[in-house]
Image (cartoon, rainbow, N blue to C red):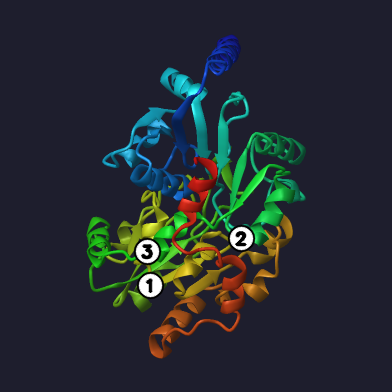
Amino acid sequence: MLKKIINYLKRLNYTKAVYKTVFRLVGMLPADPKLIVFESFLGKQYSCNPRAIYEYLKQHHPEYKMYWSIDPRYASSFEGKNVQVVNRFSIQWLFIMARARYWVSNSRLPLWIPKPNHTVYLQTWHGTPLKRLAADMDEVHMPGTDTESYKKNFLTESSRWDYLISPNQYSSEIFKRAFGFKRTMLETGYPRNDILYNEIPQSILENLKQKLQIPADKKVILYAPTWRDNQFYEKGKYKFNLELNLDKMKEELGEDYVILLRMHYLIAENMDFSAYKGFAYDASHHEDIRELYLLADLLITDYSSVFFDYANLKRPMIFFVYDIESYRDTLRGFYFGFERDAPGPLVKKTEEVIGIIKQLEKNGYQLPENFDRFYQKFCYLEDGESAKRVVNQVFK
């Protein structure tokens, strides 16, 4: 048995070496100047900044040939989207990637993929940072790596980026340091947030409610937590313990509300909400969280960067931070005084969440005193035209 495993690993390493060599050889051929490859969250989603840039190009510059690099296990996420797809690491993918003039991604590509000299790599990233990133992390608690290797690999990857999108000046300063980024920073705002500033027909939101089977007369709570570095099954698959008490939520709020639960793309849990039918809905596989923002009357989150995006809508936010001491002091650490500057109340118990929602029902919502300062620091570039600014600087 051991011999078979060793032989398999040898064949795997040989195959990867051959693939890498062919990729490098094909990459020596002239680039196709109109060929762009997009990828979002390791090929799992049609979403985020790459999607917004793709849709802007498709509408305004249809002369480009555009492909989406996808993980075939998530092919259903791309069905019906009218996009050309290519399976990640397939032979076809090799030839398209190696000949492409542009790569557009919001997360890291494998280091063993050689970047051709003719390729322009646009890294969009995927959030304004609260928690410490890359070289700024004191210790790395993720599986399959250690602190030194993680930082070294991250900095090697970021050295391949030609452009990096930043949502604000605050992020630019952090990205330069944490990613060791020395090339062109595009301080444009996030293209994915353009939709939050463009008028959406009510019929689209009604159709989305129907698609998710949400009652039309109920208000919508969106719960979108992040992942915990030290809670995992294996590399790339993280556990999540649902600390929010849905029984109490349903009992106290079920008459007027439903709750959508949107787990981070790295969380491997398959949630079973059958006991909460008609109240709790698993929206983790609804790839475009922007649509969920538009549906949601209220956001519950923790340390996820979703709150920077949702703030553009100026709607209520509650921060359910039951493990804030360990997350802040052990796992990641924060870039600013989160407890002081968060644009909403921080709570640790479900009862507190329910109490705040009931107060909102009774008294209505008023922006927190610190909201304007928060908005001017983190959201000031968002105006519905970020994708246009990126395209004008990179593709034109």
Q: Position of residue 174 (x, y in %)?
A: 70, 55
- Farthest front residue in view: 396
CA gap between label 3 and label 2 equals: 20 Å
Of mark 1 and mark 2, the one earlier in the sequence is: 2
Residue 201 visible in rendering: yes
Where residue 154 sits, quadrant-wise, is top right
Q: Position of residue 303 (x, y in %)?
A: 59, 62
Name the residue tied to disc 3.
Answer: 198
Task: Give the amino acid at mark 3.
Answer: Asn
Task: Give the amino acid at mark 2.
Answer: Asn
Residue 241 horizontal side relative to residue 358, left or right: right
CA gap between label 1 and label 2 equals: 25 Å
Callout 2 secondary element: loop
Name the residue tied to disc 1.
Answer: 297
Name the residue tied to disc 2.
Answer: 168
Task: Give the amino acid at mark 1.
Answer: Asp
Q: Residues within 10 Å of mark 3 (few under 14, many from 20)?
A: few
Where residue 337 sits, quadrant-wise, is bottom right
Instruction: Point out which mark residue 337 bears.
Output: none
CA gap between label 3 and label 1 equals: 18 Å
The residue shown at (26%, 62%) is 209
Of mark 3 and mark 2, the one earlier in the sequence is: 2
Of mark 3 and mark 1, the one earlier in the sequence is: 3
Question: Are circles 3 and 2 on residues that touch, CB within 8 Å?
Answer: no
